[in-house]
Amino acid sequence: MEDDVIGGFNRLLDDQKKAEGEADLTLILFDSKYHVVHQKSNIKSVGPLTKNVYYTGGSTSMNDAIMHAIKTVGNEIASTPENERPHQVVMIIHTDGHENSSVEFSNSTGGTSKVQRAIATQKEKYDWKVIMLGADIENLSGYAAQYDIDPHSTLSFSNTSIDNRRMFRSASNIIGAVRSASYSGVASDYLVGEDEVTGMDNTNFSTSDHSDNTE
């Protein structure tokens, strides 16, 4: 499924580059550990995701990745003059597995509870939009609730080629709505059906280029 994920993300990236307004992207990948690919990069300058950067792993250090994102993005915004700060932040968490390998915020040290409190603070105090997308996650809404993410902010998919297309197109719709200040607060309002992606070719958006596009 690597090609589907890469192609889907790159199509989303292309959509957002064409959208009106400015946006910065922070992209953090996680498997047995997390990897910062982009941090506060102007979205129009971000190169496509490649197989050199994205590849499947066997574990899920989601807690560490989320906390790193919250801390770094929060600190960056705090250090930015108020009149230059973004009017909205949307955090999209995409996972095909449960947390099982974080080091600093592991389950054994109450890491999930700490992440839950951090997400709640960003949502309540700073109006962050936090969405969880799950691929083959049983009872996604129940799992997301452990992170203070309500059911209206989750979308569940199968880990198939067509559902990967649906997921990234739906995510792009959500991001576009947040950027235009028209987001309804219900993720399913932006859900793309199978008929909308059937026949869609992600080939041009998936690349085997092994150059390093990290910025």
Image: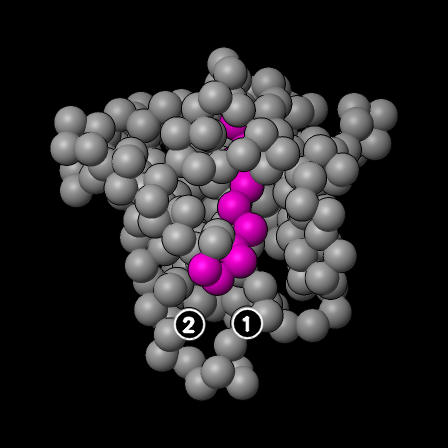
Give whichever of 188, 209 is nearer the camera: 188
Q: Quadrant of residue 146?
A: top left
Q: Position of residue 23 (x, y in %)?
A: 59, 68
Q: Is residue 103 above or below residue 120?
A: above
Q: Residues within 10 Å of mark 2 (few under 14, many from 20)?
A: some
> Which residues are drawn in magenta?
125-134
- Disc 2 to disc 1: CB gap under 8 Å: yes
Q: Position of residue 78 (x, y in %)?
A: 38, 74
Which of the labelled discs sits on residue 77, or is there none? Answer: 2
Dominant secondary-structure state across the stretch colored magenta: strand
- The reply, left or right, for residue 102 in relation to residue 95 is left
Q: Identity of the amino acid at label 2?
A: Ile
Q: Spatial distance from mark 2 to mark 1, Cα to Cα?
A: 8 Å
Q: Identity of the amino acid at label 1?
A: Pro
Residue at screen point 45% across, 29% down = 145
Q: Is residue 75 above or below residue 187?
A: below
Q: Tell me which label, 2 or 1, sits earlier in the chain.
A: 2
- The reply, left or right, for residue 72 in relation to residue 144 is left
Let me know if residue 16 is in the magenta part.
no
Report if residue 108 is visible in the image: yes
Give whichever of 199, 36 is nearer the camera: 36
Q: For mark 1, what is the residue?
A: 86
Which quadrant would the C terminus be assigned to in this image? bottom left
